[in-house]
Structure formats: structure tokens, C-alpha cells
Amino acid sequence: MSSRNHKRPVYVYPTAEECALIKQSWDYILSPPVSESGADTSTINLTIAPTEHSALSDHSQNHVVSTTGFVTTQSAAFTGTQQYPNSPATQFTIAFYTNLFHTNPEYRFLFTDVFRQSSALSGMLSRIVRNVDRISEGADAMRRLGYRHAAVYKIRDEMYETVGRNMVCTVRETLMKQGRWSPEIDWAWLTVWTLLSTWMKEGAHMNPDESELDQKEKCSVM
Ligand code: HEM
């Protein structure tokens, strides 16, 4: 970031206890009790509802999660059938997008392929959780991600709060079903989300050269 950038926001880092809660709760999400895993159910029908946005009607998607470990997608937007790994992490992000499109149907049109996106987000969340104790090392990667969100996906600053609320609610909902939720978990996720959003919003306001868009290096933290 250049020195032209005015006031630096205050970064609130998760405490050691919050880092531990994040890791523990993510472990719970990834390893639900057997009764929650759906292993005794042959299929689960999941529908990501399209918005009223008329241009989107072609993107309405019907998804079937099978016990073969894959999510099958049948959609007017695809010519064939697509399969995605059906991991608990992907299930969590699918629940997250389902909640998001329920509270904010207008966000639906931003996503071209919710299942591909669910898998990208769950991968990133896993990396963030794994490295949450050294989260600051990922700040620049998050700024670049924030630049892409603003420049390519047209995401505005105020959307981070809406999406963050949904993320915390989905964590709560998932853990409540397991009887493993506590209010401290909400705070821990909120702290991490707010910190990541702060970096992403900084990135959103960078110049293209500052955003180092051509830099393709992989950051070990994010
Ligand atoms: C901490 C916050 C967030 C994280 C970690 C995150 C992560 C990601 C990742 C990993 C991708 C995959 C593509 C890429 O790497 O460029 C992505 C794409 C995307 N994200 Fe985010 N995101 C965040 C916040 C948001 C918010 C607030 C919105 C607002 C609705 C949003 C909307 C999108 C959209 C529209 C795409 C592209 C989807 C597509 O191409 O179909 N993200 N995000």
C-alpha cells in the first residue's frame, strides 16, 4: 500500500483463545457427528433458489447430494451434468450461500456457478483456519483478493457486513444442530471476518499497479 493512503484502520486480531475456538469449531463443521452426516439418508435434495431477476431464470439449478460423495448439478446453465466433491466443508459453504440468497436474493446474480464457488470458498476457509494464528501473513493476499472482488466481481464495501453476518449465522446454525455452539464462537468468527474484510476493503481501493494483479504467486497462508 502506498503512503498516499490516508488513515490506516485499526486491525483487531483474534486472541489465542479465539484462534483455538475457530479451529475447534471448524473441526466440528468438518467432522459432524454420524447422526448429522446424512450417512443414513440415500439422497438429500438441495435447491439453490434463483432470484426474481428475470435474466437469471436460465441459471436456476437443481442439486442432488448423493452418498457417492459427489454433488450432481443439473442446470439449464450447463449442457451436461457436473459433479463436485461433497465434503462437509462444501456442504457448509452451500448452506452459507443458501442462507445468503434467502436473505439477499439480489446477490444471486453475482455468482455464475455457486457450486464451483462453494468449493473455492471452502478451500480458502480451510487455509485461513489452519493458519489463523499467523493470519497477518496473509494480509497482502487478502488485499489482492479484495481488489479482484471490487474490480472484477463488482463487490461494494457494505456487502462485507451482510455476507459476514450470514457466515456467522451459518456457523451458528451448523454447530447448534450438533449441540456444540457457544456465543464465544460467534465472536471469534466475527473478529476474523472483520479483519479479513478490512484487508479486502483496503485492496478494493488500491490502484491496479498496487494490487499487483499480474503477481500470481501463491501465499502459504491464504
Ligand atoms: C472474507 C471475505 C471473502 C472471502 C475470503 C472470499 C473468497 C472468495 C474466493 C476464494 C473466491 C474465488 C475467486 C477468486 O479467488 O478470485 C471468491 C469469488 C467471489 N466472491 Fe468472495 N470472498 C469474500 C467476500 C465476498 C463478499 C462480501 C462478496 C459479496 C457478495 C463476495 C462475492 C464473490 C463473487 C461474486 C465471486 C465470483 C463468483 C463467480 O465468479 O461466480 N465475496 N470469493
Image: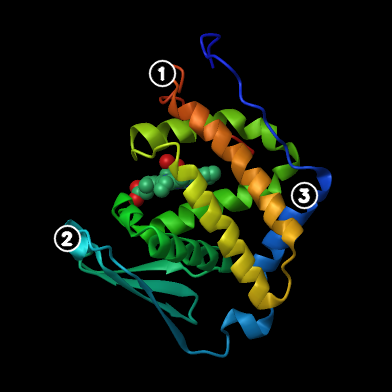
Q: Nearer the viewer, residue 1 or 197?
A: 197
Q: Secondary structure at mark 3?
A: helix
Q: Is mark 1 within 8 Å of ligand 1?
A: no
> Which residue is rendered at x = 32% and y = 69% of the image?
49
Q: CA distance from mark 2 to mark 1?
A: 35 Å
| Residue appearing at x 46%, y 64% in the figure | 99
Mark 2 and 3 residues: CB-CB less than 8 Å, in contact? no
Q: Position of residue 117 (x, y in %)?
A: 42, 54
36 horizontally vs 21: left or right: left
Amino acid type at mark 3: Glu
Q: Which mark is residue 122?
A: none
Q: Earlier in the sequence, mark 2 or mark 1?
A: 2
Whole-angstrom CA distance, mark 1 to mark 3, is 34 Å
The quarter of the picture where residue 74 lies is bottom left
Res. 91 in view:
yes
Distance from Cα at disc 2 to Cα at disc 3? 43 Å
Task: Mark 3: give few (<14), some (14-19) or many (20+) Cα within 10 Å.
Answer: many
Q: Which residue is mark 2?
A: 54
Residue receiving disc 3? 18
- The crowding category of the residue bearing disc 1, from other C-alpha atoms within 10 Å (few below 14, some 14 to 19, many at least 20), is few
Instruction: Locate residue 215, reporting x and y percent.
Output: 46, 25
The tag on residue 207 is 1
